[in-house]
Image (cartoon, rainbow, N blue to C red):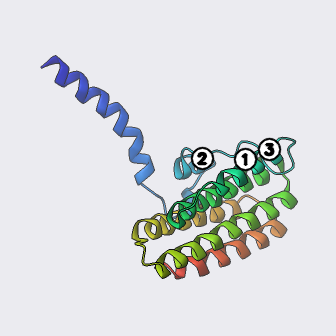
Amino acid sequence: MIKTLIITVLLGFLLVPLSNVFALETDPTAITRESSYVLFWPIVAGQVKGESLYILKNLKENLREKFIFNDIKKAEYQITLSEKRVVEAEKLLLEKKDSLNAKSTLAAAQDAREKVVQLIQNAKDNNQSMVDVQDRFRISLEKQKMLLQFLITQVSSEEKQNLEKNIESLNSVLAKFN
């Protein structure tokens, strides 16, 4: 009886914070700085472009990608990289006030998204089931869009133009999976 009570209480503490993860807001004004952590948990920006150790982070990611041989796994990895780049762009724009590196980081996010599209197509051509990856990608795109829409409310007009272009590009990819 006591074991059951303890397990129930512990599960309650574990599951209550997860309710925030599943309650995605669609209103960009409802997104906050902390929301990117909830949207993309466990992804955090860490080192960003322009910082001295970023080159090592980039090298590690490129090396890791070389050892993934399955199109499905490569697509999943590229989805993660696109999410990382968007979170890094957030840090660059809001904390570092570095719009130049944010712009190239968002371009890298777009490159990763395009790789996902190509990898999904390759897997389909090889008769591999991509339903789970496509669903994950669509959800990721929607989350990325929410974060970018939030960032538009936080930056200057010049930076807004770049974010809007990125959202347009993201929307064109998203249209392929809806």
Residue drawn where x is 59% and y is 70% of the image: 116
Label 3, residues with CA under 10 Å away: few <14, some 14-19, many ≥20: few
Q: Is residue 48 above or below residue 89?
A: above
Separation (CA) of disc 1 from disc 3: 6 Å
Tell me the element at label 3: helix
As drawn, the label of residue 33 is: none
Q: What residue is shown with label 1?
A: 60
User: In the picture, which quadrant includes the N terminus?
Assistant: top left
Q: What residue appears at the point 78 percent right and 52 percent down from the top-left corner?
A: 92
| Quarter of the figure with residue 141 | bottom right
Could you tell me the amino acid type at mark 1? Lys
Nearest to the observer: residue 10 or residue 158: 10
Side (left or right) of 104 relative to 109 = right
- The dot on residue 56 is 3
Q: Which residue is mark 2?
A: 43
Q: Are marks 2 and 3 in contact (CB under 8 Å)?
A: no
Judge whether 94 appears above or below 153 on screen. Answer: above
Percent position (x, y) of residue 176?
Answer: 52, 82
Instruction: Calculate the distance from the C-alpha at mark 2 to the C-alpha at mark 3.
Output: 17 Å
- Tell me residue 102's x, y (percent): 80, 59
Image quadrant assignment for residue 145: bottom right
Q: In the image, what residue occupies the spot 27% across and 27% down?
A: 9
Q: Position of residue 65 (x, y in %)?
A: 65, 56
* Marks 2 and 1, how far apart at CA: 16 Å
The reply, left or right, for residue 51 in relation to residue 110 is right
Residue closest to the eye, 78 or 67: 67
Dot 1 falls on a residue whose secondary structure is helix
Give yes or no for contact between labels 1 and 3 (Cβ–Cβ under 8 Å): yes
Q: Name above or below for residue 136 compared with residue 16.
A: below
